Image (cartoon, rainbow, N blue to C red):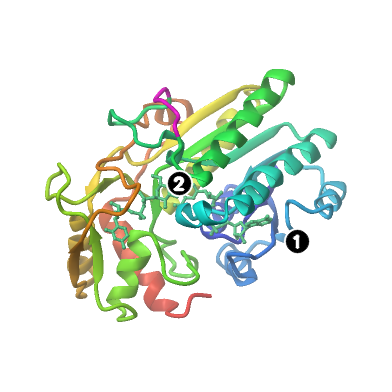
Amino acid sequence: MKILVTGGAGYIGSHTCVELLESQHDVVVVDNFSNSSPKAVERVEALTNKKITCYEVDICDVELAQVFEEHQFDAVIHFAGLKAVGESTKEPLSYYQHNVQGSLNLLRMMKKHGVKTLIFSSSATVYGQAKIVPIDETSQLQPQSPYGQTKLMVEQMCKDLSAAQDDFTAVMLRYFNPVGAHQSGMIGENPTGIPNNLLPFISQVAVGTHPELRVFGNDYNTVDGTGVRDYIHVVDLAQGHVKALEALHQSNQFTTLNLGSGKGYSVLEVVDAFSKLNDVKVPTIFVPRRQGDVEICYAACDKANQLLDWETKLSLSDMVIDTWRWQTNNPQGY
Ligand code: NAD
Ligand code: UFG
């Protein structure tokens, strides 16, 4: 199939491009490089020995039309957007513009050009403070941030379009905590500024960029008092996209799917695995809970396991080892 990948130069997008190309699909990338580098696309080409047609285009702009005029796509995998929860509370309009308006523009283009399959990067953040774990797809939807709201709004647009157009397929993939990097060490997460997320921060402590990891809260009702999350290796996640595309592209339905490992690890368990397996020091200090954090969050992934014939293969050990390989091979990022 010929696939348009929006945000294909980004962290999850670049890993998904590798898996798509290795599964013999053709890939066209659209990215404005606001949070990524064209080098990521070059590395994907080098890794797979295949070509990608890449456009520097913002999905909110009229130039997107030209991309649809030049190619007849079988499906779109839509990663492009902004993703920092904290920033979204300070700059909500940017989030509504890039995530909602950008998606609306994309859906309009798809409709105009008869492209009938969309795989969308949603997020576990749509569940907000879920009271019951594991979280399944029927859990209440109550996002706590503008970022989460934008994800839910795009889901709703896709649901409504799917109801209006019988042959439209929309698959909403709700990711839990993507971490790790490709085993080659050639592509990985490349955060700009001080990272908010746990694994990139641990890596930067291990290379000495920061003196210690601040662990947000050690008074949760968990195995060691620190927050528990469902970490999923980005390569497993990327393969989930290919499986979703291949299994559901003619389903003519709106489908929501959790993509996680179904297991929860505490902050200290992750730190411990990272320092032991990579033989590095990761000093930690305990600080008060971070506002908005939940105690425990992990996914029920039975629906994705069954519908996609997919399950995660990579462990916490793979996640921390691959993160560190990427970091040491690319100390300055791309
Ligand atoms: P990323 O920032 O690495 O990738 C997003 C890409 O989209 C970047 O290359 C960026 O330059 C591009 N982009 C942003 N706005 C654009 C626009 N208007 N037009 C064109 N390109 C644009 O992020 P990621 O971690 O790869 O996340 C991909 C998607 O998955 C995002 O939609 C994100 O919200 C979602 N998601 C990520 C996580 C996570 O923890 N990484 C969790 C849940 C959901
Ligand atoms: N943590 C620390 N110190 C840090 C960073 C994180 O102790 O410096 C802790 C957090 O308190 C939390 C865990 O590590 O317990 C994971 O935190 P992350 O920031 O890595 O991830 P979150 O679970 O907060 O959020 C992530 C993405 C969201 C997405 C959500 C879905 O950032 O975009 O997963 O579950 F919506």
- Circle 2 residue: 237
Q: In this view, does 33 lie to the left or right of 182?
A: right
| Residue stretch in magenta | 138-142
Which is more toward the observer, 133 or 95? 95
Q: In this view, does 69 lie to the left or right of 75?
A: right
Q: Residue at x 59, y 36 (%)?
A: 245
The answer to which image quadrant residue 144 occupies is top left
The answer to which image quadrant residue 267 occupies is bottom left
Q: Residue 119 carries which label?
A: none
Ranked by sequence position, the earlier of labels 1 and 2 is: 1
Characterize the local packing of mark 1: few (<14), some (14-19) or many (20 or more) Cα atoms within 10 angstroms.
some
Which quadrant is home to the N terminus?
A: top right
The answer to which image quadrant residue 168 occupies is top right
Which is more toward the observer, 301 or 46? 301
CA gap, disc 1 and disc 2: 24 Å
- Circle 1 residue: 55
Q: Measuring from the top left, give residue 3's x and y in whole percent.
A: 69, 45
Mark 2: C-beta under 8 Å from nearest atom of ligand 1:
no
